[in-house]
Image: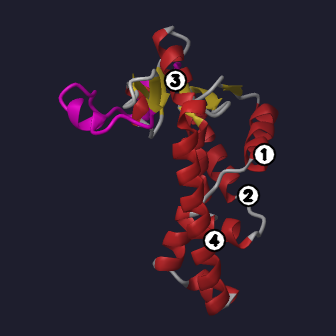
Amino acid sequence: AVVVPSRSGLGWRLCMGVKNLLQYLKGCTATKQNISHFKGKRVGIDAMCWMHRGAIACCFELVSGRESDKFLTFFLRMIALLQGYDVTPVVVFDGCRMPGKAEEEKKRGESRATAAESAKAMIEAAGITQATQMTGEVRTKCMQAIRITNKMIRKVMCALRALGVDFIVAAYEADAQLGYMYSAGLVDAVISEDSDVLA
């Protein structure tokens, strides 16, 4: 997130993302590293990135209102992968929503709801059995409708606690917390698909 002057001139507002950030950093970014490079290190993880990744595997079930733990299985496999290379994961979950981003969050929520309605209509028209075998538009709509719920987050937290994996809930967004943790030397690296962590 970036703080910029508001257009009205009456204070400041938060912007989602930094447009074209990765293009500007193209010449400064590090080369690819094998995970073994981080052996013995503590690595901060943006939990929502892995939760969204894992939810893709069960997007049909989530939209259909059916129970699935595929998102959890994905998350725990990623943790096990790191631990297999003697990397210590430190998982960071998003905390409170940023008040300045309420409008953007509302738009995203409406977009997810619209995609969910479209997906449900397609599933109903095709029948569940037929729809589960469909790819393309139904799957795309289901993916666009993914919403990570508090129940899903609690499942991941409970599993991490049971495994003895460190995790925290950021005051606001995980990317800012991870940036701070890296700058303060609390973690040696950060895993995130959110380029805001670089800002």
Residue at image mark 2: 69
* Residue 60: mark: 4
Against 49, residue 173 (above or below) is above
Instruction: Assign a secondary structure to mark 4.
Output: helix
Helix, strand or loop for disc 3: helix
The span from disc 2 to disc 1 (Cα, nearest Å) is 9 Å
**Real-space Cα separation, disc 1 to disc 4, in angstroms:** 19 Å
Give me the C-alpha separation between circle 2 and circle 4: 12 Å
Query: Mark 1 or 4 closer to N-term?
Result: 4
Q: Is residue 5 left or right of residue 98?
A: left
Q: Residue at x 77, y 69 (%)?
A: 66
Mark 3 or 4: the one toward you: 3
Residue interval drawn in magenta: 15-42
Residue 91 visible in the picture:
yes
Image coordinates of residue 23 in percent, x first then y, are: 22, 37
Q: Residues within 10 Å of mark 1 (few under 14, many from 20)?
A: some
Residue nearest the observer in this picture, 121 or 153: 121
Badge 2 crowding class, 10 Å Cα cut-off, few under 14, some 14 to 19, many 20 or more, is some
Observer-side mark, 1 or 3, equals: 3
Q: Are marks 2 and 4 in contact (CB under 8 Å)?
A: no
Count up the numbered dots. 4
Disc nearest the viewer among 3 and 2: 3
Label 3 and label 4: CA atoms lie apart by 31 Å
Image quarter hosting the C terminus: top left
Give the mark toward the camera: 2 or 4: 4
Q: Which residue carries the number 3 mark?
A: 176
Circles 1 and 4: CB atoms closer than 8 Å: no
* Left or right of residue 199: residue 42: right
> Which percent across, then down, holds residue 14?
47, 29
Work out whether mark 3 precedes mark 4 in sequence or the reverse, and give the earlier one. 4
Instruction: Indicate the position of residue 129 as horizontal and vertical percent values.
Output: 67, 88
